[in-house]
Structure formats: structure tokens, C-alpha cells
């Protein structure tokens, strides 16, 4: 059975750090583009970062230079290191296999929990 399980969310003050982790099973993790999304209005999810099967990396401009994505193929894990957190980073964060979406003002979106491979999410709350 396909399963993606996130952990590492929590509450932190602005300027602090969190590390999100995702453990995958039931599909070919090594051959998949894996990413982190966060929930936006109307149950849409904004692509925060992804790492491709070829190890190419993408960051949303809003998190570039603050977040870092990585994967460990031997352990089927995906990690997002989040530094210098801002209140605007507050959201439910999802680990997912990256699929095509739509673009608004330079950012990519797709519906949260659409067809595809998604975790259940982990909440990040950043206080002022």
C-alpha cells in the first residue's frame, strides 16, 4: 500500500527553525520527484520545494535561502529544513509526489489531496 507519513511540525516563534520529515513506502521512491506543499486558501496547495529523480531542486521564491530540501533514497525519506521561519509560513505541510499544476504569480499550485500520492500533513505554526 502506498503510504507517505510526515512528522516534525509544531509551534515555533518567528526566526526559529523546524525540520519536517517524510517516510515513504509502497512505490518507487527513487524514481519519483518528491516535494513539499503547503495549504493555501480553498484547499489548494502551493508547491514549496521539490527534488527531482535527477536531483534537480526547486524552491518557491518565498522560501528560497531559508529552506533546504533533501532526500535519502536508501531510507525512503524526504526532509525539509526550515530556517528563519515567518508567521506567513504557518500552514499544513504535505509531502507528495510532484505532479503538474498551475502557476500563479510565479508559484505552482495543485489541489491538496488530489489524485496522486500524498501524506496526511503536519501542521506548522509560527508565532510573531
Image: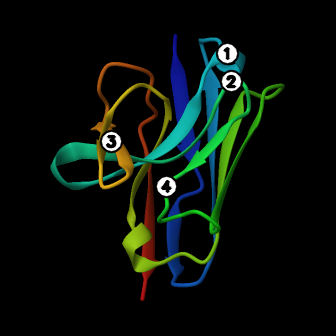
Q: CA distance from mark 3 to mark 1?
A: 22 Å
31 lies above or below 37: above
- Give the mark nearer the N terminus: 3 vs 1: 1
The answer for how far apart the CA atoms under marks 1 and 4 are is: 22 Å
- CA gap between label 3 and label 4 equals 11 Å
Q: Which mark is residue 60?
A: 4
Q: Is residue 70 left or right of residue 10?
A: right
Q: Image quadrant of residue 94?
A: top left
Q: Which residue corresponds to mark 1? A: 31
Which label was assigned to residue 53? 2
Q: Is residue 97 left or right of residue 100?
A: right
Q: CA distance from mark 2 to mark 3?
A: 20 Å
**Residue 45, percent across and down?**
32, 44
- Which residue is painted at 43% across and 29% down in the image? 118
Kindly check if marks 2 and 1 are in contact, taking CB atoms under 8 A apart as contact. Answer: yes
When the figure is inspected, residue 38 is found, relative to residue 97, above or below; the finding is: below
* C-alpha span from label 4 to label 2: 19 Å
User: What residue does disc 3 label?
Assistant: 109
Element class at badge 3 = strand
How many C-alpha atoms fall within 10 Å of the one at disc 3: few (<14), some, or many (≥20)? many
Q: Return the disc, 2 or 1, that comes first in the chain's sequence.
A: 1
For the C terminus, the image quarter is bottom left
Give the mark nearest the N terminus, 4 or 2. Answer: 2
Please rate how many residues cluster around mark 1, counting C-alpha atoms within 10 Å: few if below 14, some from 14 to 19, many from 20: few
Work out how far the residue at label 2 is from the one at label 1, CA to CA, in angstroms.
5 Å
Q: Are marks 1 and 4 in contact (CB under 8 Å)?
A: no
Tell me which label, 3 or 4, sits earlier in the chain: 4
Residue extending farthest to the front is: 106
Amino acid at each position: 500500500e502506498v503510504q507517505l507519513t510526515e512528522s516534525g511540525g509544531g509551534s515555533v516563534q518567528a526566526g526559529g527553525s523546524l525540520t519536517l520529515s517524510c517516510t515513504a513506502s509502497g512505490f518507487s521512491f527513487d524514481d519519483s520527484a518528491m516535494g513539499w506543499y503547503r495549504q493555501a486558501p480553498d484547499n489548494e496547495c502551493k508547491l514549496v520545494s521539490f527534488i527531482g529523480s535527477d536531483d534537480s531542486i526547486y524552491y518557491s521564491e518565498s522560501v528560497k535561502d531559508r529552506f533546504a530540501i533533501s532526500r535519502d533514497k536508501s531510507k525512503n525519506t524526504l526532509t525539509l529544513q526550515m530556517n528563519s521561519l515567518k508567521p506567513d509560513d504557518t500552514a499544513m505541510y504535505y509531502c507528495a509526489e510532484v505532479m503538474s499544476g498551475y502557476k500563479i504569480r510565479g508559484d505552482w499550485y495543485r489541489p491538496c489531496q488530489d489524485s496522486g500520492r500524498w501524506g496526511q500533513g503536519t501542521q506548522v505554526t509560527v508565532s510573531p
